[in-house]
Structures are given as C-alpha cells and as structure tokens.
C-alpha cells in the first residue's frame, strides 16, 4: 500500500460510479484528491467525507467539463490549493441512448461536449501544468470498449470514445520528452448507477452470465487499474489502451470463431 503517498490527483465526474471508485482507490494508496462533478450533485460531499476518513485531504470542485473555461479554472484552483497536480483522471462522460436516425442534435452536442471535448480540455490543461512544472506526471483517460464495439443506440458516445483513444495515442508521443505518461482504460460492462438507468436488474444478471469472468465489473476494478497507471510501477507505460472487461471482448471473438465452419 502507499503507492501514491502525498501525490495530488484530480478525478472528473467523481461523485458516482467509476469516478468515485477511482477516487477512493487513489486515496487508499495515499493520494490527496480534487474531486469534480456537476454543480448540485449531492454525492460529491459524501465522497469528500469518505476520502477524509481515509486520512487524505480532499477538495470538491463543481464544474462542467464541457465548458472549457470552467475546466481551466478547475485546474488552476487545484494547483492553487495543493501547490501542484501529479495525476489527472479524465473520467467524466455523458450518454443518451437513441437510434442514430432518431438522435436529437442537442443530445449529440452534449455527448461530444462532455465525453470528447471535456476529455481534451482536462488532458490539455493538466498537461500544460505538468510540462511547466518539469517533474513529470500521470494522465489517465477513461474510455470504453465502445471505442471498439459499435453498440447500437450509442453512435455519438461510441464516436467520442474512439476519438479520445486516438487523443491519448497522439499526446503520448508529445508528452514523452517531459516524462508525462498518458494512458487510457477501456472499461467493459461495469455495474454503476448510470448503467442501472438503462438496464433492469434481470438484464444485468443475464449480462453478467455472458461475460467470461462471470460477473459485471465494479468501479473498484477500474480504480485499481488507475492506481497502477498512476504509480511508479507504470513508469515505462504510455500511449497504451488497457481493457478492464473481464474478457468481454475476448469472449465475443471466441464466440465468433466457434461459429465459423
């Protein structure tokens, strides 16, 4: 334990689900946290309390990552409060599920503003601070297996997740001379409050049985991977995509091969 002692990390979209799991796992390993979510999200205050019980400092900053100026101000406030930023986790995302031919343009714009451009803003402003500080850093982007798997009714979200995978690949080469690692975690089917807005309990149980590992993923599964990528153990890893999906994508490939011939 203590892989991240006294490091300072920011996690966007941290109040619930994957973001909350990541923030708590980072805190367990010794990091102090800036936790972000939209204004008036009640779970953000309870997250700060939970991090404090772990013996770490936490600052809650409300901001809409789809607003570039708010993201810039958030990074500046984080640095002003803690003096530096060692780890940035671009997790915040937004999704509306609707067939492409029925998609409402305002929904598409919002999905891209948060899930694609919000990631760009977070990565860019965090990287600018890390470059200027000249002491390296870790940037972690939370993508999705939907960057590879074209899930129906999710065209804009799929597009956004594919785009941020390529953003990470691009920034990895640019940031390597500054010893700033940037990697993406592509979660599979994760049991989160957001997922439960789209699926019933029975659908989740049936889905879990189809996953080779035999269960849905948890926010903690993603959080432990984020801890590794944020630690010195991942010093030589950059520009990498890591699937955390319990074999979901591999299971699909195996099923396809089994049907051939």
Image (spheres, helix red, strand yellow):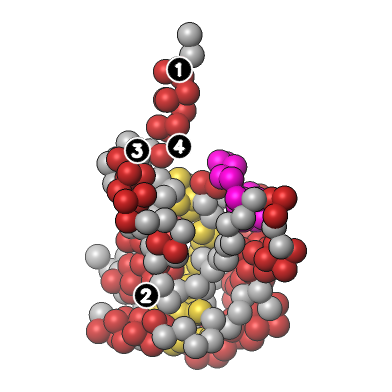
Vertical relation: 255 (above or below) 238: above
List the residue tagged with mark 2.
31
Question: On the rendered structure, is 134 left or right of 8?
Answer: right
Q: CA distance from mark 1 to mark 2?
A: 48 Å
| Residue in front for this viewpoint, 49 or 195 | 195
Residue 236: x %, y % from top left: 48, 50
- Secondary structure found at label 4: helix
Disc 1 or 3, which lies upstream in sequence? 3
Q: CA distance from mark 1 to mark 3?
A: 16 Å
List the residue tagged with mark 1.
259
Q: Read off the magenta span.
A: 147-162
Instruction: Report the residue that reaches farthest toward the right.
Output: 105
The image quadrant of residue 126 is: bottom right
List the residue tagged with mark 4.
249
Residue name at image x 57 percent, y 66 percent? 94
Q: Can residue 257 be seen by looking at this rendering? A: yes
| Residue in front for this viewpoint, 199 or 132 | 199
Residue 210 numbered tag: 3
Disc 4 or 1, which lies upstream in sequence? 4
- Near mark 2 (Cα within 10 A), the count class, few <14, some 14-19 or many ≥20, is many
- Name the quarter where the N terminus is drawn: bottom left
Q: Nearer the viewer, mark 4 or mark 1?
A: 1
Q: CA distance from mark 4 to mark 1?
A: 16 Å
Q: Are marks 4 and 2 in contact (CB under 8 Å)?
A: no
The image quadrant of residue 65 is: bottom right
Q: Number of callouts in the render?
A: 4
């Amino acid at each position: 334990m203590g892989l991240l002692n006294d490091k300072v990390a920011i996690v966007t979209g941290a109040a619930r689900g994957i973001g909350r799991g990541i923030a708590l796992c980072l805190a367990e390993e010794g990091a102090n946290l800036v936790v972000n979510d939209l204004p008036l999200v009640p779970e953000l205050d309870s997250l700060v309390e939970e991090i404090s019980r772990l013996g770490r400092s936490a600052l809650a900053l409300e901001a809409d990552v789809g607003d570039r100026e708010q993201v810039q101000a958030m990074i500046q406030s984080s640095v002003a409060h803690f003096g530096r930023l060692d780890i940035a986790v671009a997790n915040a995302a937004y999704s509306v599920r609707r067939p492409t031919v029925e998609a409402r343009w305002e929904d598409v714009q919002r999905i891209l503003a948060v899930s694609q451009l919000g990631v760009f803003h977070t990565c860019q402003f965090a990287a600018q601070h890390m470059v200027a500080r000249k002491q390296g850093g870790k940037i972690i982007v939370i993508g999705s297996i939907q960057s590879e798997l074209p899930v129906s009714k999710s065209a804009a979200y799929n597009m956004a997740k594919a785009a941020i995978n390529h953003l990470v690949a691009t920034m990895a080469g640019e940031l390597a001379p500054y010893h700033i690692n940037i990697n993406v975690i592509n979660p599979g089917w994760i049991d989160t409050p957001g997922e439960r807005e789209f699926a019933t309990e029975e659908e989740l149980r049936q889905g879990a049985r189809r996953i080779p590992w035999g269960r849905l993923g948890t926010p903690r599964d993603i959080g432990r991977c984020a801890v590794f990528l944020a630690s010195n153990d991942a010093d030589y890893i950059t520009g990498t995509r890591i699937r955390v999906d319990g074999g979901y994508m591999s299971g699909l490939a195996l099923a396809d091969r089994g049907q051939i011939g």
